Amino acid sequence: MKKFLSMLLVTAMVASMLVGCGGKKSESGSDESGNVTLDIIISQYGNYTQEWWKEFEETFEAANEGIDLNIEIVSWNDIYEVVNTRISTQEQPDILNISGFADYVTDDLLMPAEEYVSDELQANFVPSFWESNAIDGTVWALPILASCRALFCNMDLLNEAGIESVPETWDDVLTACQAIKDTYGDEIVPWGLDISTDEGQAAFAYYAWNFGGGFVDDNGDWALNSAENVEAVEYIQNLIDSGYCNSAPFTDTRYPLQDAFSAGTLAMMIGPMNMVAADSTVNYEAADIPGEHVALGVCDQLMVFKDEEAGDARTEAITKFFDAFYEVETYSDYMVYEGFLPATQDASANLAENAEKYIVGGTEDTAGNSEYFATFCAVLPNCKFYPMQKTEWMDVRNGVIDVEQQVCSGTTDAQTALDNLQAEVAE
C-alpha cells in the first residue's frame, strides 16, 4: 500500500481500568410521561469529537420522539477519575465509552450486551471484535472502533536489495533482513524490534500468535510454555543475534522506530495502522504479519450500566441509540471523522469503496481514502486480542517481557524461562 492520508489517523487510546465501586443509579432514566433520558459519556478522541456528537444528538432526538440524549464528552486524561467518582456516588451514566470493562463486570455493574443489542447489529459486528468483549461466554460491551497492527515495509529499500514483495513467512523475513544488511550495511536497519517494558507484550503476541502459539490454548487456559511460543522467542533472539534489528531492542519503544521508518532509515517493522508520519515520503506497503497472518487487535468499548429501577423503555431506548450510531452511513462518517477503523462488517465494506464521501474531523475538504480502509479493514477479521479479562493478565504481560529480555540477553533459554512463567501463573 502506498503512503496515504495520515490526517485520517488518531492514535487509539487504550488504557488499564481503575477499579470502581458502587451500585445502581439512584433515579430511573424515564419520567412520568414515559420520556427516557439517557446519560452518555463519550471519550474525546480528537479536537472535534464534541462537534460530531452534538450533531448526532440533535439528529437522533429529532427522529426518536420521547428519547433525550445527554451526551458528555470527557478527555482521556480525566475520564477514569470522572467515571469512578460517579460510580462511587451511584451516578454512573447509562452508556459509557471507555477502554476496559472487566472490573465493572466483577462489581456486577454492567448489563450483558445481548440484553440491549438487536440481532441485526450483533450479526453485523466483525466477529473477532464482538467476541473480544466476552468474559466466560458473555459479551459485556460493544467495540466502538477498531485499530490493528500490521507489517510495514519500505518497498524502495526492499526492491533495491533485490526483494520484490513483502515477506510472507518468517524465513522470508530473515532473507529480506540479510539482503538489506548486505546492500546497505549499517546505513539501514533491516527490522524494528521493541521488547521494552513499554510494549514488549505486543512483540510476544506478534511472534507467538504467528508461530501458531499464544497466551492461552483453545480452552482459554494459560499455555505460555507451548512449543510454538518457545520457537517464537528463539526467533526473536535470532533477529538480535544476527544483527538484523535496532541496536537497543530492550529499551527502544516503537515510537522512535516508527520515526525511523517514516524517515526511511528502517526497512521493516510491525506497527499500528497510523504509524507513518504525515510528512513522510516513504513508499511503503502494509501487509499481513508473516506466518499465521494474525494481527493484534485493539478496540475501545461502549458499555451499559445496570439500572434496576428503570423499565423496558430504557432498554428499548438504548437499543435504538446503538442501532442509530452503528447505522452504516452514520458509523462510516464517524470512523473517517475520528480516524479509526470500523468494527462492523457493512461499514468496513462501505469505507473500502466509498471513504471519499466522508470528511476528516476539523477539515472542510480532507476526505477519507478507500484504498487505505480496504487495506486495513481486511486485517480486522484476523485480529486476536490480549486476554485482558483474565485476572492474571498483568502478571503475564510483565512476565513475557521478562522472558524476552532474559532470553535475548543470554541469561537463560526460552524453554526454561517460559516453563517458569507458566508455573508461576498456573499456581
Image (cartoon, grey):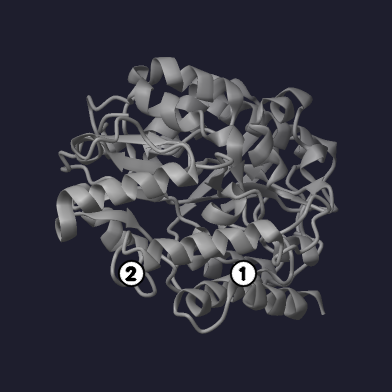
Residue, x 85% and y 42% (percent of image)?
311
Picture quarter containing residue 196?
bottom left
On screen, residue 399 above or below 207: below
Q: Which residue is mark 2?
A: 252
* Quadrant occupied by the C terminus: bottom right
Q: SS for tag 2?
A: loop
Crowding around mark 2 (Cα neighbors within 10 Å: few <14, some 14 to 19, many 20+) is many
Left-right relation of 187 to 204? left
Residue, x 22% and y 24% (percent of image)?
365
Q: Name the amino acid type tagged 2.
A: Asp
Q: SS for tag 1?
A: helix
Q: Is residue 317 visible?
A: yes
Q: CA distance from mark 1 to mark 2?
A: 34 Å
Q: Which residue is mark 1?
A: 84
Picture quarter containing residue 318?
top right
In the picture as drawn, the residue positioned furthest to the bottom comes out as: 411
Picture quarter containing residue 77?
bottom left
Q: Report x, y in % for residue 71.
A: 53, 45
Closer to the chain start, of discs 1 and 2, is 1
Left-right relation of 89 to 150? right
Residue, x 69% and y 39% (percent of image)?
130
Q: Which mark is in front, 1 or 2? A: 2
